[in-house]
Image: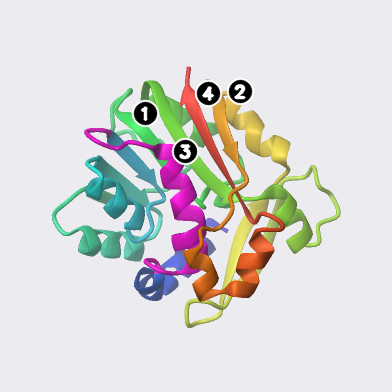
Amino acid sequence: MKETIRQAYNLLAKQYNALIDHKPHNAYYDRPNVLKLIGSCEEKVILDAACGPGKYAEELMRKGAEVVGFDISSEMIKYAKERNKEKGEFFVHDMEQHLVQIKDNTFDVIVCALALHYVQDWSQTIQEFYRLLKEGGKLVISIEHPFYEFNYFKSKAYFDVEPVKCTWNGFGVPTEMHSFRRSLGDCIAPIVSNGFFIDQLIEPKPVDEFELHDPAYFAKLNQFPAFLCISAVRR
């Protein structure tokens, strides 16, 4: 599955990068809510885990942060470097592997937006985030809402960690995307069991700009969430 995901993102990277600034679910739903949880960035060192084409990094550096980003897709990393020119550090890396080149207690914040659903077992990844964060550092993640996914994939066994797939049609070429669906408990437990306490959990609503691009989906997202955003602090 991992190689399938890598290939899918390499295929989508060019169009994904072209759309990321204003694609409603990213620009007017996920990003404003995650950035609000991150808060002040001035003089902070931030890891952008699964950075995609570097849009989060661009926003964080604009606010005064120093950013390191990685992604499993080499094409995404190419666009992250192009987008941010000489700013930031970007490299190819698998989120399920240790970042052996980076020392303990390096980062003030780690952000991982809409990517953990590609990882079957979160424990090792969360443990690595803990190692990399300074004491009192913040982990901010966004994920597909477990209740939304349970309904979307018409699942029958809520408590299972379940491989799922769907077809993405919003990036020019229809692309089959694989991931793992899990319960709310299986999202929370790896965080609190590996040295973090959750200080904020948000079922986000879209900002007003979303309505200008997709009024029908704007109405839906104000009735039932598609994403879940979590801020957790390293104990």
CB atoms at circles 3 and 4 under 8 Å apart?
Answer: no
As shown in the figure, which amino acid type bears the numbered disc 1?
A: Leu
Disc 2 residue crowd, few under 14, some 14–19, many 20+, Cα 10 Å: few
Main secondary structure of the magenta stretch: helix
Q: Residue 17 occupies which quadrant of the picture?
A: bottom left
As shown in the figure, which amino acid type bears the numbered disc 3?
A: Val
Point out the tag, 2 or 1, that comes first from the N-terminus. Answer: 1
Label 3, label 4: how many angstroms apart (C-alpha)?
Answer: 11 Å
Q: On the rendered structure, is 94 left or right of 41?
A: right
As shown in the figure, which amino acid type bears the numbered disc 2?
A: Ser
Above or below 107: residue 75? below
Q: Name which residue lies at 26% across and 33% down.
A: 44
Q: Secondary structure at mark 4?
A: strand
As shown in the figure, which amino acid type bears the numbered disc 4?
A: Phe
CB atoms at circles 1 and 4 under 8 Å apart?
Answer: no
Point out the tag, 2 or 3, that comes first from the N-terminus. Answer: 3
Q: Which mark is residue 140?
A: 3
Q: Which residue is mark 4?
A: 196
Residue span colored magenta: 20-44
Q: Name which residue lies at 48% across and 77% down.
A: 171
Q: Position of residue 3 (x, y in %)?
A: 50, 60
Q: Which mark is residue 193?
A: 2
Q: Position of residue 100 (x, y in %)?
A: 32, 33
Asked if residue 157 lies in the magenta stretch, the reply is no
